Structure formats: structure tokens, C-alpha cells
Image (spheres, coloured by chain):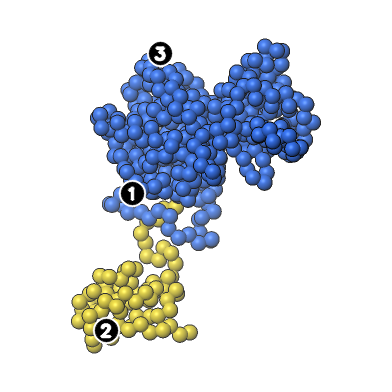
Amino acid sequence: MGLSEELVLPISRPSKGASGRTGVWRVFKPVIDLQKCVKCWQCWLLCPEETILADDVPKVDYDYCKGCGVCAKVCPTKAITMVEERE
Amino acid sequence: MKGTWELINANEAAAHAARLARVKVIPIYPITPQTMIVEVIEEFIVKGMMNAEYMRVESEHSAMAAAIGASSAGVRTFTATASQGLLYMHEVLHWAAGSRLPIGMAVVNRAVGPPWNIHADHQDAISQRDTGWMEFFVSSSQEALDSILIMYKVAENSKVLLPFMVCMDAFILSHTHMPVNIPDQEDVDSFLPEYRPPHWSLDPDNPVDMGNLTMPEEEYMEMRWSIERGMKNAREVFRETSDEFYRIFGRRYGMVHSYKVEDAEHIIVTSGTLASEAEVAVDNMRRNGRKVGLLKISLFRPFPQEETRTILSKARTLTVIDRSYSFGYGGPLAMEIRSVLYDLDERPKLVSYVAGLGGRDVTYKDIEKMVLHSEKEKGKRMVTYWYGLKERIRSSGFEEVI
């Protein structure tokens, strides 16, 4: 039986930005010093929002990074610093 | 008649219904007077009469959360509770209905505290009125068993997709043995095939997220509207389903049950076991020449507005008896009935009573007294009379106490 249009479900499929540009929530911004980065990919692995992009080097997707600071905390060479956002 | 006869109470009848419905997951937490449902289901599983995952959970809140998980995974799910347990589930009841999961639950209606009281009272289920659950009140063990099967089929219909509770009075039903016809499994299988979710389920190959953050400009309000559409459709689906049940099992159930209303000038409106007691009052009063009838409201949500209005519009006087209360207003059933009658040009006189709270006994004699009282009452008063309070309160001259 086909489902009617009147069935509106609280269901979403995984898609980028389903909850809007969450990067605007950020207070502190992770900045990566590529001189110190050893490409261990711990930041990529542990980012809870999957906003560290694995290019040749790690890169932050600032549209969706909420600035939680997990990447800076786990970085073994302290290559990531949290910088306060300013207007 | 097919099936086998057993002398059982409504708790056992509910457990049989879960077995016959081939429920796959039962997350459940015991509470008086529902505990026997837990025990009998355990026994069915241990004896190999039922193939289901029985989950011991740490609370009713967890029971309903686990039921949501199981139903989301796409299997028929059952649980049961009462009183404080149902109140503890309250938040999660909204999630079950909002996620459109056709979970089935037996609620053994018991008073809520304080003070502790384990006896019959509808306050627990009535307090869940606006959660989006369908609520069906029964007056016998047979009705408890049959309505769980019927309501699963209604709930799982693609036009409905809402959870349901079948409500049965504590002790008066849950612990009173009466003859029950246990349907044959093959008949139940043909009536109620395996649940296959037509809308959504958890699937690792096709991941979904349920209940994610929704902004005002997104579809939150549309989803609430959609629950109401499901409720609206449930009335028609119930009619079709109960007809089908009648064709297979020979027992007919309506959203309302009427008794001797055809020529009735005075109709008693109530639900649960008060309704079976009221049938005795009707017979008695008819022997004395009074044209009294009964309308039992079985389906409280969705409310059977048309059926109720059609039957009640012909009467002159209505005695509405509630076994719960909405503080600051009156009897919940009386509120619904008044509202249903509002659009009529000529409305019967309606007198509202609350009786039997906390399991206080209400006999056919009490019901007859309420009927006689409403005959004398002027009507057009938005009050609910408290029936059967202690003499020291009755004799103190309070208004609306009889």
C-alpha cells in the first residue's frame, strides 16, 4: 500500500548541513599550524562532527565546525590552537 | 465457536493476546496490578509457547524507550504497565507516537499517588490523553484479549501508524477470573499477519536519523498535523478492522458500546467496568418502568464523536460518570460529551459525576442513585458532582457533593 502525503515523519537521511550551518555556533576556532602537523590524523579520527577533511593535510570545514576543541586537545604535536572568533 | 475456553483474568488475557499476536520484543517492568502479565509472558517464553525477546529493564521509562528501539527495528512490540509506571513513561509516550511506531501496551488502570493506592481508577490513562496514543477501555477479559489483536491491526495500518493502549480496571478485571475464548493461532495469523513497517525502520544499509532537531520554519508543525490525520483515519480503520474481526471470530466491538438506547429517554455514559455495572442498573430501572439506556465509551482516543452524538442526541437526560478527574474543571468524559453535543440545536440535559476514585466500590445501586439525582437536577450547570464521599463531608453542606 502506498503511503499518503499526510504521513509526515520525523525522519532524516544523513546529509551535509541537515541542521543548517552549525559553524556559526563557534566561539573558538581551531587553527592548524601545518609546520607542526605530522599527519597522524588523530584530529580527523576524533572530530565528533566530521569537520576535519582529509586532504593531503588536515583541513577544517569552518561551515560546520562548532569549535569544540577536541582536535586541539588530541593533537600530539600541539599543531592546533583554539583562537577566539572576533567579528 | 472455534478456539478454546479458559477461566482467566484480564492480565492473563493480555498475555495471551501478546502471544497470539506473535509479538517479537517485550521490554517490561513489573508493577502491581500488572505484574501477572509479566509473569505469564515469561512462562509462555520459557515453555516455548512464544518466540520473543524478553527484556528486563530498570524502569518503565526504559521499557518504553526499549519498545521504541524494537519497534524502530521493524518488529511487533508489546509492553504493559499501570499507574506511576505509566506516568513515568509519559515523556517517552510522546516519542513513540511522534515516531509513528505502532507499539501495543496493556494499561491496568490504577490510582495515582499520593497516597499509595493500587485500586481501580482511570487517572493514569486519562493523564496520557494528548500523547498521540490511541486509548481503548475494556470491561471484560475477553474484550482485553480481543481488543489488543484488533488495535494492533488498526495501529499498523499505513493510514494510522500510531501506538495504542488497551486499558483495563485494576483488580476488577486484572485479578477476576472469567471464561475467555482463546482464539486459534491460525485464525489470529490470518487476521493479523506479520508486521512489516510500511513507513520507516532502522536499517544499517539505508541509515536514517529519527527525531533530529527541527526548526520552526521546518516541518515540526506538519508532523503534529500528521499525527492528527492518523487519529482521524483510525476511526474508519477501526470500523473496517472490527468488522473483519467479527467475520473471523464472531465477536463484535465498536468504538462505543450501546445497551438498550433505542427508546431510552435517559442514557448513562461511562467506560471500563463501571459500564458493565451500569448494564445491571439499566435492567433494574427498566423493570421499574424507567426508559434508561447505557453508552459505553470504549475508544477514548480517537474519540468517536459521530457515534456518540447520534446516540445521545435522542435522549432527554444524560448521566455521565467518570472514574478520573481534571482538577479545576470536572469529569474528563463529561467534558468530551458536552463538547460533542454543543453543535446540536436541542441538547439533552447533561449531569456529570465523579465516582469510584482509588477503587471505591460503585455498585448498580449507586449508579441508580446518580440517575435519579440527574433526573431532579436542573441541568445547564458546568459542575461535576462528587458521588460517594464520606458522610462527614457529605453532611457539611458543601455544594456539588452528594
Point out residue B341 in the picture as x, y percentages from the top left corner.
70, 34
Amino acid type indicated by mark 1: Leu
The N terminus of chain A lies in quadrant:
top left
Please give left or right for residue B66 compared with residue B270 in the image: left
The colour applied to the residues of chain A in this rendering is yellow
Q: Is residue B92 above or below residue B53?
A: below
Same-subunit check for callouts 3 and 1: yes
Left or right side of B80 for B351: right
User: Is B7 in front, or is B251?
Assistant: B7
At 53% across and 61% down in the image, what residue appears?
A: B217
- Specify the subunit that label 1 lies on: B
Q: Residue at x 43, y 22 (%)?
A: B177
Q: Which mark is residue B202?
A: 1
Q: Mark 2 points at which residue?
A: A79
- Estimate the x, y position of residue B4 in percent, counting from the top left: 36, 17
What is the C-alpha distance between the residues marked 3 and 1?
41 Å
Q: Chain B is drawn in which colour?
A: blue
Callouts 2 and 3 close, C-beta under 8 Å: no
Res B343 seen here: no
**Chain under disc 3:** B
The kind of secondary structure element at disc 3 is: loop
Q: For the residues marked 2 and 1, what is the alpha-carbon distance in whole angstroms? A: 40 Å
Q: What amino acid is at disc 2?
A: Ala
Q: Residue at x 54, y 43 (%)?
A: B115
Using the rendered image, report if marks 2 and 1 lie on a common chain.
no
Q: What residue type is labelled 3?
A: Met
Q: Residues within 10 Å of mark 1 (few under 14, many from 20)?
A: some
